[in-house]
Image (cartoon, helix red, strand yellow):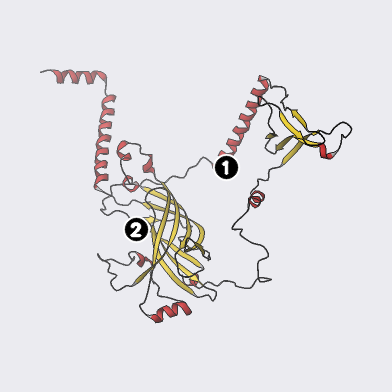
Amino acid sequence: MANLRRRRQDHRAMEGGVLKSRVITWEPSEEFIKNNHVINTPVQTMYIMGDLGPYGKLGHREYERVLCTIKVDGNGVIIVKPDFTGTKGAYRIELDGEKRELWRYTIENTSAQAQREEEEREQRMFRDLYGRHKEYLNGLVGSDFEMTRPGELRLFVNGEIVSAQGYEYDRLYVHFFLELPSRWSSPAFQQLSGVTQTCATKTLRRDNVAHFSYPFTLEMFFTQEDESEGSLPQWPVIYFEVLSLDYWQRYRVEGYGSVVLPAAPGFHTLIAPTWRPIELSLVSELRRFFIGGSPELEDLTYIRVPGTFTGERLSRFGFRTETTGSVTFRLHCLQQSKAFLDSSALRKRMQSVLDRLGGFSQQSSLFSVLEAFQRARRRMQEARESLPQDLISTSASTVQQP
């Protein structure tokens, strides 16, 4: 962590002192957008021209007019401009010269209509083509689908650190790590910490905003071990700190914060406020301004409840802090569990996926008892149906006798 804070950056001056071209165009023109966002699809273009010159002046370029433009791209799409005349009437071209002239022309599709056999053959060809493409995609994906074990929940998070705003100094970066509570685990290859790039701020609505757009991926598993435990399981927490780094490699802590991963799947936008510890002395603020450095937390889990705390009440009396800015997160959460395969009405009424994994509350215990009763009743009905019919009728008549 210390290495991350004291990382060095190369500040060698570029040749010429300034950039030779702008890296970012903040206010692009319409022509700039068209030139840089065009789809480079090969296109062949043909023009149907008309020589509208008067008698004796044929062949002069000033009398040539484009009557129709036909374009064919690499995907086989034919574009005719203007469109076929149809019921819209003839197109008009007016010429201003010695005397005003008006030309009218029509564009018609005189191609022979395809026969029914040709259309059917074309449809079969397209079906075969799409079928082969589907088989190709299925071969890339495969038929094996990784499943979780019974009583296990898989949580997959595609996240993004979007921005940080409202901080005192410029050139910000964020260091973060994921804490897994008990009964949570992650694959061996999963990286549970990271650091963003250093980002300069931009003034936006009177706030200095640093746009990181830093993506990260997290994968973790929750395993149910003992259903008799009365406490609810805890969700993983992302702890982070925002730091600033100036030209002289002096770093300052701008704020600490945390984000609890959402319990519901889907897309979530979270804005996490931050704070930093302070000392009520002028010397501390002068030190922070001139030589960098500030009071820091030795254990980032102190942002919430430290992992080493075992008491009932955590006191922060005398610990002075100052509210700073905030960090915006975007999280796409996916959950996978075999408990989702249960389509019974009792399971659908449960509000939390953790309740589906076992009896973590009185409600889940009640549903478990009701489901066990329904399973026993179903087995009894199946056993009754397997008995011989004469035995069932004999027992029924015996019961009906007074």
Looking at the picture, does residue 265 appear above or below residue 247?
above
Front in this rendered view, residue 10 or 148: 10
Q: Residue at x 38, y 55 (%)?
A: 184
Q: Position of residue 112 (x, y in %)?
A: 72, 22
> Residue 231 falls in which quadrant of the image?
bottom left
Q: Of the numbered discs in the image, which one, if any, rests on residue 393?
A: none
Q: Is residue 291 visible?
A: no
Q: Mark 2: which secondary structure?
A: loop
What residue is disc 2 on?
A: 182
Q: Position of residue 284 (x, y in %)?
A: 40, 79
Front in this rendered view, residue 386 or 178: 178
Q: Quadrant of the C terminus?
A: top left
Q: Amino acid at mark 1?
A: Leu
Q: Residue furthest right?
A: 56
| Marks 2 and 1, how far apart at CA | 37 Å
**Residue neighbourhood size for the residue with mark 1, other residues' Cα within 10 Å, grouped as few (<14), some (14–19), many (≥20):** few
Q: Position of residue 75 (x, y in %)?
A: 67, 37
Does residue 84 appear left or right of residue 254 in this picture? right
Q: Is residue 169 visible?
A: yes
Q: Amino acid at mark 2?
A: Ser
Q: Residue furthest left?
A: 402
Q: Position of residue 312 (x, y in %)?
A: 24, 64
Front in this rendered view, residue 1 or 165: 165
**How many numbered discs, if any?**
2
Q: Mark 1: which secondary structure?
A: helix
Question: Between disc 2 and disc 1, whose residue precedes?
Answer: 1
Q: Residue at x 26, y 35 (%)?
A: 374
Q: Residue furthest front?
A: 99
What residue is disc 1 on?
A: 140
